[in-house]
Amino acid sequence: MYTAPLKDIQFVLNHVADINKVTAAINRQDDITPDLVDAVLTEAGKLAADVIAPTNHTGDQTGSRHHEDGRVTTPAGFAEAYQAMAEGGWTAMDAAEEYGGQNMPMVVSSMVNEIWQSANMAFALCHLLTQGQVYALQKSASEEQKNLYLPPMLEGRWTGTMNLTEPQAGTDLAAIKTKAVKTESDALGTHYRISGQKIYITYGEHDMAENIIHLVLARTPDAPEGVKGISVFIVPKFLVNADGSLGERNDVHCVSIEKKLGIKGSPTAVLSYGDNEGAVGYLVGEENRGLEIMFGMMNHARFSVGLQGLAVSERALQQAIGYAMDRKQGTPLGGQSGDAIINHPDVLRIITTMKAEIEAMRALAAVGGAAMDLAHGGAEADRAFWDERAALLVPIIKGWLTERSLAVTSLGVQVHGGMGFIEETGAAQHYRDARILPIYEGTTAIQANDLVFRKTLRDEGKAVFTFLDEIDAEMITLAGNDHPVVASAAMAVTDALADARLAINHILSSANDPRRSAVSGSNYVMLMGYLAGGWLMARSAAKAAEQLEADGADENFLNAKLVTADSYMGHALPQVMALARSILAGDDAVLAMRPDWLQG
Ligand SMILES: Cc1cc2nc3c(=O)[nH]c(=O)nc-3n(C[C@H](O)[C@H](O)[C@H](O)COP(=O)(O)OP(=O)(O)OC[C@H]3O[C@@H](n4cnc5c(N)ncnc54)[C@H](O)[C@@H]3O)c2cc1C
């Protein structure tokens, strides 16, 4: 069972991410009204709970299946659920209106995407990848390509994939070998013939849509070596006629799908291109600019995977709360015989810390979405600032939310005791599903490299220190708050800021020795995540305290908010200090190790 956390989402949107300010800044206050946002979230919550969430556990048990004739069938209910999303217009939510999209701001669509991903992450991945491709095509494809491919994807009739990975080219896309040879222009117009093998292609083949549009990275014959010689192509499963109708089957085939640790409902395909005459592909943008085009959508895709971390954590929390309210075992200290395990102080600790981190994750995701909205649609003079802020936040959101989802879903298993280890309850599934998140769309190490080298060393810490200064100023105000939880939260964050500054200065001081900077990267991502979470939980506590004063306040909800903020400061925020210590002390200990010593 899953219930969309609408109250918390609304609280975060209205009081932490300040959606009204965002919609005003992007001139959308007339169409993105509070009533509309409320209706969107409520309807998404219903579809997620009634149609999508029931496919989660069964989908994990059956998985997708590859057939001898190359077809792939998804678990029972997946195709119907996708159809329902399409009929509700959800597949068009965040695309441009001119192609049939609804142009929903990211701050809202991120919260809706959280809901889909909580309901069934393996299923919702198809939508995530399609959104990613839509975003890339909107930004970089020709007008004809956009008009031909975007509307059916937004209507949910076709889906999209991202084809980067090859056996020898994972993190290092410079090693891509898939070939693209330009043919003479014929009845199909100018096109290329694509040949090669792509692996790990999510929803590379399936039965949920009429057509699949692959976005494929490949090299033309005389392309320069390395990343400067990669181009990107649209390769439809069924060729598309000029009027949008489907033509012949293209020369791309699913060889097999992977057996995996988690997200088993989603097919992860090995795709073979050009077994016969070569798959027909259409160049997007210019030759050799493929990686640039993919990088153009990277913030979007990485942010979406960060949201998956939040989503799977929320699902694990709901399941853990349900179990802990029901299961009886022993007499909790200070309680009575027959009290449920939620009354054991340690179980309460686990669940409260899970909830606190999830609220911090959600707040950070919403603030990240708002930054992207402001970067794209805010006042011209402010766009560069918000672009820089979004670029800073994305590796933190991707890295921190996904890494913490491993711990949060593991705590969910712990609450279930032995039943957590038994597949029947579904708690183990969330833990297994979460494991992919710090791996795909750039491993945590890649987020760390991004944060250290591009977002910190390149501007000598300017963007990150500006961010820290803003947090500092807000905490100075909150430290004077009448509510003791708010004031002490602000002081805790101020202390953490001092630790963060020491750690960042240490990273900056090793700028001339990139190996040293890189050693600190993953800890730096996590430190920034915990710190940003603390910042927003302090803000959240202040808003909750303020609202408690109002007549008719939702006291249970608001008091719980104050408790989660307090819990965050006591149990999560101290990680900033620990990580800063590791950063300050850790380089020598790592770099002194020689790989040849490791095998004895
Ligand atoms: C279920 C699943 C779905 C996927 N879906 C897709 C998809 O739809 N489309 C697609 O194109 N790909 C997809 N992928 C591929 C995924 O993006 C890659 O697996 C990922 O980028 C890592 O590449 P790799 O597996 O080759 O690992 P490697 O690159 O071999 O990395 C192995 C280890 O080395 C580390 N490492 C490598 N390079 C560096 C570096 N420069 N600095 C520091 N550490 C480094 C990594 O962090 C990692 O810990 C999927 C993968 C899986 C498992």
Image (cartoon, rainbow, N blue to C red):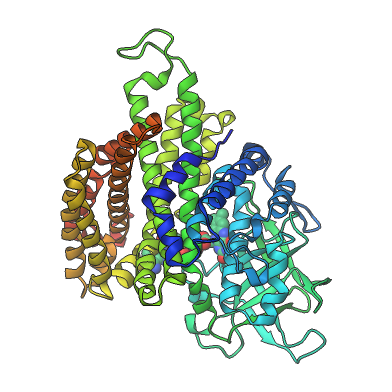
Please say whether residue 37 is visible from this viewpoint: yes
Tell whether 363 sits left or right of 520: right
Tell whether 249 sits left or right of 454: right
Horizontal and vertical percent position of residue 276: 78, 75
Horizontal and vertical percent position of residue 577: 20, 49
Horizontal and vertical percent position of residue 574: 22, 44
Please say whether residue 441 is visible from this viewpoint: no
Tell whether 474 sits left or right of 559: left
Towards the viewer: 180 or 531 = 531
Residue pushed farthest top?
337
Q: Residue at x 28, y 51 (%)?
A: 535
Q: Please state the total of marks drawn on the protein image.
A: 0
- Residue 68 lies in quadrant: bottom right
Q: Residue at x 62, y 45 (%)?
A: 43
Q: Is residue 2 above or below residue 579?
A: above
Residue pushed farthest front?
551
